[in-house]
Amino acid sequence: MSTFFVDLVQSIFIPGPTSTLVLATNVSFACLQLVLLVLLLTTYSIHFAILSILSAGLWWGINWFVTEVQALKSQEEEEARKKRQADDAADDTETEAEIVVTTKKSTSGSTSLEPQQQRGDLKDRGDWGSRSEISTEDEWERVDENEKEKEK
Protein backbone atom coordinates (compact mmCIF):
# COMPACT_ATOMS: atom_id res chain seq x y z
CA MET A 1 0.00 0.00 0.00
CA SER A 2 2.83 2.39 0.79
CA THR A 3 4.45 1.66 -2.58
CA PHE A 4 1.21 2.77 -4.24
CA PHE A 5 1.47 6.21 -2.65
CA VAL A 6 5.17 6.45 -3.49
CA ASP A 7 4.39 5.55 -7.12
CA LEU A 8 1.54 8.06 -7.12
CA VAL A 9 3.80 10.89 -5.98
CA GLN A 10 6.52 9.88 -8.45
CA SER A 11 4.00 9.74 -11.31
CA ILE A 12 3.64 13.51 -11.00
CA PHE A 13 7.11 13.89 -12.52
CA ILE A 14 6.52 11.38 -15.34
CA PRO A 15 4.89 12.78 -18.50
CA GLY A 16 1.71 11.12 -19.63
CA PRO A 17 -0.80 9.02 -17.75
CA THR A 18 0.75 6.30 -15.61
CA SER A 19 -1.17 3.25 -14.43
CA THR A 20 -0.89 4.40 -10.81
CA LEU A 21 -2.33 7.81 -11.63
CA VAL A 22 -5.19 6.33 -13.67
CA LEU A 23 -6.01 3.92 -10.86
CA ALA A 24 -6.01 6.73 -8.28
CA THR A 25 -8.26 8.83 -10.52
CA ASN A 26 -10.74 5.99 -10.99
CA VAL A 27 -10.85 5.21 -7.25
CA SER A 28 -11.37 8.91 -6.45
CA PHE A 29 -14.28 9.23 -8.90
CA ALA A 30 -15.83 5.98 -7.63
CA CYS A 31 -15.70 7.33 -4.05
CA LEU A 32 -17.20 10.65 -5.24
CA GLN A 33 -20.06 8.81 -6.95
CA LEU A 34 -20.68 6.79 -3.78
CA VAL A 35 -20.80 9.95 -1.65
CA LEU A 36 -23.15 11.65 -4.11
CA LEU A 37 -25.42 8.58 -4.10
CA VAL A 38 -25.56 8.55 -0.29
CA LEU A 39 -26.32 12.27 -0.21
CA LEU A 40 -29.04 11.81 -2.84
CA LEU A 41 -30.67 9.04 -0.83
CA THR A 42 -30.52 10.95 2.44
CA THR A 43 -31.70 14.35 1.19
CA TYR A 44 -33.73 13.49 -1.94
CA SER A 45 -32.25 16.61 -3.53
CA ILE A 46 -32.07 16.80 -7.32
CA HIS A 47 -28.79 18.70 -6.98
CA PHE A 48 -26.89 15.54 -6.03
CA ALA A 49 -28.33 13.68 -9.03
CA ILE A 50 -27.14 16.46 -11.34
CA LEU A 51 -23.72 16.52 -9.65
CA SER A 52 -23.52 12.75 -10.06
CA ILE A 53 -24.28 13.04 -13.80
CA LEU A 54 -21.66 15.78 -14.21
CA SER A 55 -19.11 13.74 -12.25
CA ALA A 56 -19.82 10.65 -14.35
CA GLY A 57 -19.34 12.66 -17.54
CA LEU A 58 -16.03 14.02 -16.31
CA TRP A 59 -14.93 10.54 -15.21
CA TRP A 60 -15.78 9.12 -18.64
CA GLY A 61 -14.00 12.04 -20.38
CA ILE A 62 -10.81 11.54 -18.41
CA ASN A 63 -10.74 7.80 -19.13
CA TRP A 64 -11.42 8.43 -22.83
CA PHE A 65 -8.56 10.93 -22.97
CA VAL A 66 -6.18 8.47 -21.27
CA THR A 67 -7.03 5.72 -23.77
CA GLU A 68 -6.50 8.12 -26.69
CA VAL A 69 -3.11 9.22 -25.34
CA GLN A 70 -2.05 5.60 -24.87
CA ALA A 71 -3.23 4.69 -28.38
CA LEU A 72 -1.29 7.61 -29.88
CA LYS A 73 1.80 6.67 -27.90
CA SER A 74 1.67 3.05 -29.06
CA GLN A 75 1.13 4.21 -32.67
CA GLU A 76 4.19 6.49 -32.48
CA GLU A 77 6.28 3.68 -30.99
CA GLU A 78 5.18 1.37 -33.83
CA GLU A 79 6.13 3.97 -36.46
CA ALA A 80 9.50 4.54 -34.79
CA ARG A 81 10.13 0.78 -34.72
CA LYS A 82 9.27 0.47 -38.43
CA LYS A 83 11.53 3.40 -39.27
CA ARG A 84 14.42 1.86 -37.35
CA GLN A 85 13.90 -1.42 -39.19
CA ALA A 86 13.84 0.39 -42.53
CA ASP A 87 17.01 2.32 -41.62
CA ASP A 88 18.75 -0.88 -40.57
CA ALA A 89 17.77 -2.56 -43.85
CA ALA A 90 18.97 0.45 -45.85
CA ASP A 91 22.31 0.47 -44.00
CA ASP A 92 22.85 -3.21 -44.81
CA THR A 93 22.32 -2.72 -48.56
CA GLU A 94 24.33 0.46 -48.99
CA THR A 95 28.02 0.32 -49.81
CA GLU A 96 30.35 2.89 -48.50
CA ALA A 97 32.89 4.55 -50.75
CA GLU A 98 35.83 6.53 -49.54
CA ILE A 99 36.94 9.56 -51.52
CA VAL A 100 40.46 10.84 -51.09
CA VAL A 101 41.21 14.38 -52.18
CA THR A 102 44.78 15.54 -52.54
CA THR A 103 45.81 19.15 -52.93
CA LYS A 104 49.09 20.70 -53.88
CA LYS A 105 50.38 23.75 -52.08
CA SER A 106 51.39 26.64 -54.28
CA THR A 107 54.77 28.08 -53.35
CA SER A 108 54.58 31.05 -55.72
CA GLY A 109 52.40 33.29 -53.48
CA SER A 110 53.41 34.79 -50.19
CA THR A 111 51.84 33.48 -47.02
CA SER A 112 52.34 36.63 -44.97
CA LEU A 113 50.06 39.64 -45.01
CA GLU A 114 51.38 42.90 -46.31
CA PRO A 115 50.15 46.21 -44.88
CA GLN A 116 48.23 48.46 -47.25
CA GLN A 117 49.49 51.92 -48.02
CA GLN A 118 47.63 54.79 -46.40
CA ARG A 119 45.68 56.87 -48.94
CA GLY A 120 45.01 60.44 -47.88
CA ASP A 121 45.07 62.23 -44.57
CA LEU A 122 42.79 61.62 -41.65
CA LYS A 123 40.71 64.60 -40.60
CA ASP A 124 40.59 65.60 -36.95
CA ARG A 125 36.99 66.19 -36.04
CA GLY A 126 37.69 67.30 -32.50
CA ASP A 127 36.48 65.77 -29.28
CA TRP A 128 32.81 65.24 -30.09
CA GLY A 129 32.19 62.09 -28.04
CA SER A 130 31.43 58.75 -29.53
CA ARG A 131 31.76 57.94 -33.22
CA SER A 132 28.01 57.39 -33.65
CA GLU A 133 27.28 60.87 -32.36
CA ILE A 134 29.76 62.37 -34.84
CA SER A 135 28.34 60.58 -37.84
CA THR A 136 24.77 61.38 -36.82
CA GLU A 137 25.56 65.07 -36.42
CA ASP A 138 27.35 65.12 -39.75
CA GLU A 139 24.36 63.56 -41.46
CA TRP A 140 22.00 66.14 -39.98
CA GLU A 141 24.31 68.94 -41.10
CA ARG A 142 24.25 67.56 -44.64
CA VAL A 143 20.46 67.32 -44.56
CA ASP A 144 20.21 70.93 -43.35
CA GLU A 145 22.58 72.09 -46.12
CA ASN A 146 20.57 70.22 -48.78
CA GLU A 147 17.31 71.76 -47.56
CA LYS A 148 18.81 75.26 -47.63
CA GLU A 149 20.05 74.73 -51.19
CA LYS A 150 16.59 73.53 -52.30
CA GLU A 151 14.91 76.60 -50.80
CA LYS A 152 17.16 78.99 -52.78
Image (cartoon, rainbow, N blue to C red):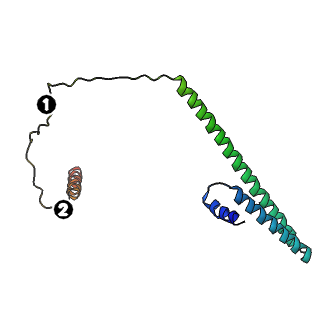
What residue is rendered at 64% in x and 60% in y?
Answer: 11
- Could you say where residue 58 lies in the image, as x and y percent from the top left? 77, 61
Displayed quadrant of residue 103: top left
Q: At label 2, which amino acid type do we have? A: Gly
87 and 120: which is toward the camera: 87
Secondary structure beneath disc 2?
loop
In terms of image quadrants, where is residue 63?
A: bottom right
Percent of width and height locating residue 147: 24, 53
Residue 145 in the figure: left or right of residue 74 = left
Residue closer to the observer: 137 or 128 = 128
Residue at (16% x, 61% y) in the render: 128
Frontmost residue, 135 versus 2:
2
Disc number for residue 71: none
Residue that label 1 marks: 110
To which quarter of the image does residue 36 belong? bottom right
Q: Secondary structure at mark 1?
A: loop
In the rendered structure, find residue 129 and report the number of the disc placed on it: 2
Above/below status of 98 relative to 72: above
> Is 132 on the left or on the right of 22, as rendered?
left
